[in-house]
Image: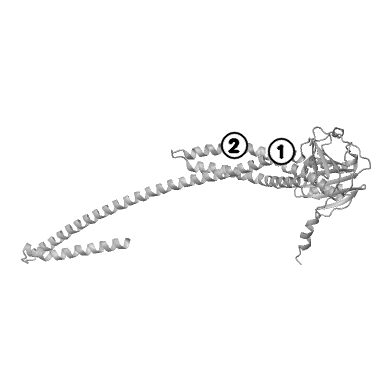
Amino acid sequence: MHPQRKTLHNELHARPSLYFDEPAHVYHLAFLSDDARCEALLQQCCPEPVSPGAVQGITRLQGHALKWERHAEFVTLTLVVTTTEQTPAWQPLPALQMDRVDAFLPYLINAVQIMVHNDAAFAGELSRYGFKDPCGSCIGGGDARVWSDFRLGEDGTNRFLFVNRRLNAYRQGRMIRRLLEIETYRMMASLSLDTAKALSVELNAYDRTLVSLSERNADPQPGNAKALLGDIAGLSAQMVRSAAKTRHRFSATQAYAQLVFERLGELRESHLGDCQRLGIFIERRFKPTVRYCAVTEQRLDQLAKSVANLGDLLQARVQVEMEEQNAEILKSLSTRADTQIKIQRAVEGLSIIAITYYLLNLFKLIYSGLTVMGLQVSARDALLGMAPLAIGVLGLILVRVRKVKHNDH
C-alpha cells in the first residue's frame, strides 16, 4: 500500500460540518494568521490540547459544540449555542469565548452570526429581527429560508436569519456551512482590493514613464541609447517587483472567488417574496471587486510585456546601428588596405629603379676598371655582356619580393 494511501483518502472527511437542531445561534469567526498565531489562538480557545498537524477538530466549550479549522491564510472558529427559546433577539458571543479571542481581534477578518429557527417559531416580521431592506432566498430547493441585510451589527458581526422548514440536522449543518464559507471566502477574496487600488496608482506612473521612454526611442535623432536602455531596465525591474509583491494576493482572490460562486450555486436559491436573492446581491457587489483585481493584474502583465517589447526594439535599433558602424569600419579598412597596396607597389617600383641604377653604376665601374687594366672592350660589347647579368639580378630580386608577399598572405 502506498504510504499516503490512507492520508489522501481521508481528505474526503477532512472538514465535516456541525450537525445540530434548531433553535440555535451559530457564531463564526475567521482570523488572519500565520503558523505561530494560529497555534496561539487554538491553544487559547480550545479547552483541549491541539495537535500541531491537525487541520480541524470538534470539541466542547461549556457544553456547546466548537469547531476549529486551519486554512492556508486564516483559521476559523465556529461555536453553536443551542437554546430552548425561539426569540428574535440576537445574542452576543458568549463571554467565555469572547475573553479567549479578545487578544486576537486585530486579526479578525470575518464575524458571522446565524440565528436558526424552525418554521413554526418564525416571527414573520423581519423588522423584529433588526433588518433594514433585507435580501432573502429559499434555499435547498425550498426546504429552508434565509435573510440578511449584510449590515454589520454593533458588535461587528454580519447577521443571518435561517428558518428551517424541512431539513434534517445533517442537511441543515451543511447548508449553514455553505453560508459561512461564502462570507469568509468573500472577505478573503476582497483583501486584494486595497492592493489593487495601490497598484493602480503605481501602474499609472509606470504608464506615463513607458510613454516617455517610447517617445525617446522613436526619436529619429541619434541619442544616448545606453541611458535609454538603463531607464527601460529600471522600469522593468520596478514592474517585476510589483508583480512579485501582488501575484500571490491576486491568485488567492481568484481561488477564493471561485469558491464563493461555487457555494452560491450549491445553495439552490429561489425567490422569496419581493426580496432580492442573496446570491444576486452578493454577485452584483462582489464581482466588480474580483474583476477589478483581475483587470489590474492583467494591466500589470500587459505593461510588463510592453516594456519588454520596447527593450527588444531598442536592442534591435542598437544592433542595426552597430552593424552600420561595423560596415563603415570595414569599408574604411578596405580603403586603407587598397591605399597601402598602391603605396607598396609604388615603393616596389621605386626600389627596382634604384636597384637598376646602382647595378648600372656598378657595371660602369667594372667597365672602367677593365679599361684601366688595358683590356680593349668596346662599350657595345660590354653592354651586351653585362645586360643578361643585370636582368638576372633584377629577376632574382622580383622573385624574392613576390615570395615574401605570398608568405605574408
3D distance between C-alphas at marks 2 and 1: 31 Å
- Which is nearer the eye, 197 or 279? 279
Q: Which mark, by number, is residue 205?
A: 2
**Quarter-of-image position of residue 79:** top right
Mark 2 Cα-neighbour bin, 10 Å: few <14, some 14–19, many ≥20? few
> Judging from the image, what secondary structure is the residue with disc 2 in?
helix
The amino acid sitting under disc 2 is: Ala
> Judging from the image, what secondary structure is the residue with disc 1 in?
helix
Q: Position of residue 335 (x, y in %)?
A: 31, 50
- Which is nearer the eye, 257 or 225? 257
Q: Nearer the viewer, mark 2 or mark 1?
A: 1
Is 368 placed left or right of 40 in the picture? left
How is the rendered protein coloured? one colour
Q: Position of residue 402 (x, y in %)?
A: 26, 62
Mark 1 Cα-neighbour bin, 10 Å: few <14, some 14–19, many ≥20? few
- Which is nearer the eye, 123 or 42? 123
Q: Position of residue 40 (x, y in %)?
A: 82, 48
Rendered residue at 23%/62% (across/down): 398
Identify residue for label 1. Answer: 284
Q: Position of residue 131 (x, y in %)?
A: 83, 34
